[in-house]
Amino acid sequence: MSKTVAVIGQGAWGTALGNLLEQAGGRVLRLHHDDSLPEGVPAAVVLAVPAQRLRGTVSTLNLPAGVPLLIAAKGIERDTGLLLHEVAAALCPENPALMLSGPSFAANVMQGLPVALTLAGQGAEKLASLLNSRACRVYHSDDAIGVAVGGALKNVMAIGCGIAMGAGYGESARAALFTRGLAEMVRFGLALGARADTFLGLSGVGDMVLTATSPLSRNYAFGLRIGAGGGVDMSALTEGVATASAALHRAVILGVPLPITAAVAAIVTGETDVKQAVAQLLDRPAGKSEALS
């Protein structure tokens, strides 16, 4: 297999992934989202663009059949409710679309600190070798749906946990939101065809531990600011904002309740305030199952 990989998107995460690929012995073509692919067939194309720009970027690609797309963004498309690998598959049906996810801050990766990721989709086991190095361990999975849902909804839950801490509700409240948020993630994923055990892995609880507890997380920091009364800064690149409304759109079709996601969406759009949202969550009737209701 050629080890030339094109990385589209040169923000912090795209730059960090390019470094990982080079550390694994590959040749990296570093491209911006509006650059054209040069001549030649890469082993893979890594898409490290914001989730809501993925459609526009993929639609401009002119790849031979069979070249895999590794999607390193985390979110759900706002206008359609589609998971990101579903967007790519609809536009490039002859190119396998895989999800790359897991607990990873770009700053840590740039420092050469150890990181573990999950690559999910057709050919994941073989493609994992592109990223495996002394600093990066890549696990493979065939559950692209679960990995996509975990990577997307953990951003929503991170906003919620940040709001709770910023508003002074304390770490016990954050732990409750974290746990119930994980149950919400599993419920949504199962309805889409994911496996429950995927959410106990790196792209589920692993990524939530990182994103929903650290101020280095954009989504958590966004929530902290709202909870502390700082208002909603919609200019920030906070993937969880668009994902919350997109997940709700699809959940309604599926008949799946997502109360925490709904609360976050209502707060960031100004439909309710933090105190009202918390009161509504606490007033929900007890469910039949602590794990999934």
Image (cartoon, grey):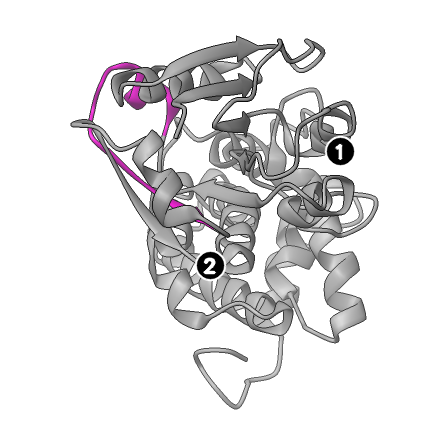
Determine whether label 1 and label 2 are within 8 Å by CB: no
Q: Kindly identify which residue carries mark 2.
A: 177
The x and y percentages for residue 218 are 50, 28
Which is closer to the viewer, label 1 or label 2? 1
Give 271 or 98, whichever is nearer the viewer: 98
* 185 in relation to 45, above or below: below
Residue projecting furthest to the left: 134
Distance from disc 1 to disc 2, alpha carbons, whole Å, reads 31 Å
Which residues make up the magenta segment?
Answer: 105-120
Q: Quadrant of residue 109?
A: top left
Residue projecting furthest to the bottom: 288
| Residue ID at (56%, 72%) | 190
The x and y percentages for residue 239 are 61, 35
Say left or right for 41 vs 269. left
Q: Quadrant of residue 67?
A: top right
Q: Kindly identify which residue carries mark 1.
A: 55
Pointer 2: residues within 10 angstroms few (<14), some, or many (20+)? many
Residue 208 in sight here: no
Please name the amino acid that badge 2 sits on: Leu
Q: Is residue 181 magenta?
A: no
Residue 217's mark?
A: none
Say left or right for 270 vs 96. right
The x and y percentages for residue 219 are 53, 35
Residue 268 in sight here: yes
Q: Quadrant of residue 60?
A: top right
Say left or right for 68 vs 134. right
The x and y percentages for residue 39 are 62, 10
* 251 in relation to 263, above or below: below
Q: Quadrant of the N terminus?
A: top left
